[in-house]
């Protein structure tokens, strides 16, 4: 049985994860952390990690970048495995994650969807053929009107996957309104759309001479991210210190 603490339990994602976890026989949420302290899902809720005395094997985090510093310190000091799902981290915070991973197991992913993480692998194969043949690469991501960071962490992860396959030969172009001139063949354009209740849509376009190849992923509910987070929690519990990704979770299931 994997014992889990849900960090950000009363947020939208925290509640979706709590609902799915309730139906799992081999995983139990033993406590939640949320500043308002309300009990919404049957397990005890604490206003901070420091007040929580529940014994656990792993923490799953879906909060905000502002809450990550204290979370990393807590996990580092207690050697607590952490599934870090919060996006929009600063460069300094990413370095903190790397330092903390020397003390405890941390799984960090821009997107917890199993589908997106499979797409990351597929894009590398496609990029070697298509980008290698001179196809332009563009990424368009769409999210709901309450998302605060842009472009999405997932869009950046998709771009990074292509760029890695091509030996990091590309730079990223986020805004074309301020730029006049032809498209640089060594750029990846990344555009963000915000509106309504769009859960998450990502499209990677390889545009060549007289042909276009498109890879797309659509999330119809937050459950796809919650399912991935729970799979990651089961995977990470008991692991040695280090920095893990969803690719490790997928590899362990094959």
Image: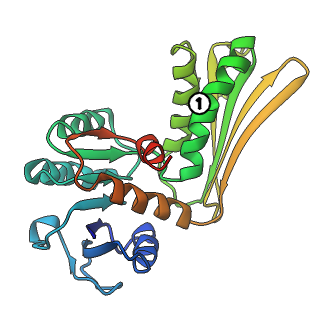
Q: Does residue 30 appear to the left or right of 128 in the view shown?
A: left
Q: Is residue 62 visible?
A: yes
Within the image, what quadrant is residue 196 found in?
A: bottom right
Q: Residue furthest front?
A: 254
The location of residue 154, given as percent across then percent down, is: 53, 43
Report the residue marked by disc 1.
Answer: 174
Q: Nearer the viewer, residue 109 or 93?
A: 109
Which type of secondary structure does the marked residue at label 1 adopt?
loop
Q: Does residue 220 appear to the left or right of 82 in the view shown?
A: right
Q: Nearer the viewer, residue 179 or 89?
A: 89
Residue in the image at 39% along x and 42% along y: 245
Q: Nearer the viewer, residue 117 or 95?
A: 117
Within the image, what quadrant is residue 177 found in?
A: top right
Q: Does residue 177 appear to the left or right of 29 in the view shown?
A: right
Residue in the image at 59% along x and 50% along y: 115
Q: Is residue 178 visible?
A: no
The location of residue 148, given as percent across then percent down, is: 47, 53
- Give the crowd class for mark 1: few <14, some 14-19, many >=20 residues within 10 Å: some
Vertical arrangement, residue 69 with respect to residue 11, above or below:
above
Within the image, what quadrant is residue 151 found in?
A: top right
The location of residue 224, given as percent across then percent down, is: 55, 61
The location of residue 188, given as percent across then percent down, is: 62, 24
């Amino acid at each position: 049985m994997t014992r889990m603490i849900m960090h950000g339990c009363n947020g939208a994602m925290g509640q979706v994860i709590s609902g799915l976890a309730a139906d799992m026989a081999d995983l139990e949420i033993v406590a939640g952390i949320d500043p308002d302290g309300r009990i919404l899902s049957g397990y005890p809720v604490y206003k901070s990690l420091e007040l929580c005395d529940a014994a656990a094997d792993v923490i799953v985090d879906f909060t905000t970048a502002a809450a990550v510093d204290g979370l990393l310190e807590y996990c580092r000091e207690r050697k607590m495995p952490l599934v870090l799902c919060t996006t929009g981290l600063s460069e300094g915070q990413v370095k903190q994650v790397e330092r903390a991973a020397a003390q405890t197991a941390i799984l960090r992913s821009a997107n917890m969807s199993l589908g997106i993480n499979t797409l990351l692998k597929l894009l590398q194969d496609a990029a070697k053929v298509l980008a290698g043949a001179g196809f332009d690469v563009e990424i368009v991501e769409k999210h709901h009107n309450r998302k605060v960071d842009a472009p999405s962490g997932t869009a950046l992860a998709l771009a990074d996957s292509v760029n890695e396959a091509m030996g990091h030969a590309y730079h990223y172009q986020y805004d074309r309104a301020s730029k006049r001139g032809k498209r640089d063949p060594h750029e990846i354009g990344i555009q963000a759309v915000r509106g309504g209740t769009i859960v998450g849509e990502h499209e990677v376009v390889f545009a060549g001479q007289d042909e276009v190849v498109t890879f797309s992923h659509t999330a119809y509910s937050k459950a796809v991210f919650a399912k991935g987070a729970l799979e990651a929690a089961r995977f990470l519990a008991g692991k040695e210190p280090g920095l893990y990704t969803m690719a490790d979770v997928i590899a362990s299931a094959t």
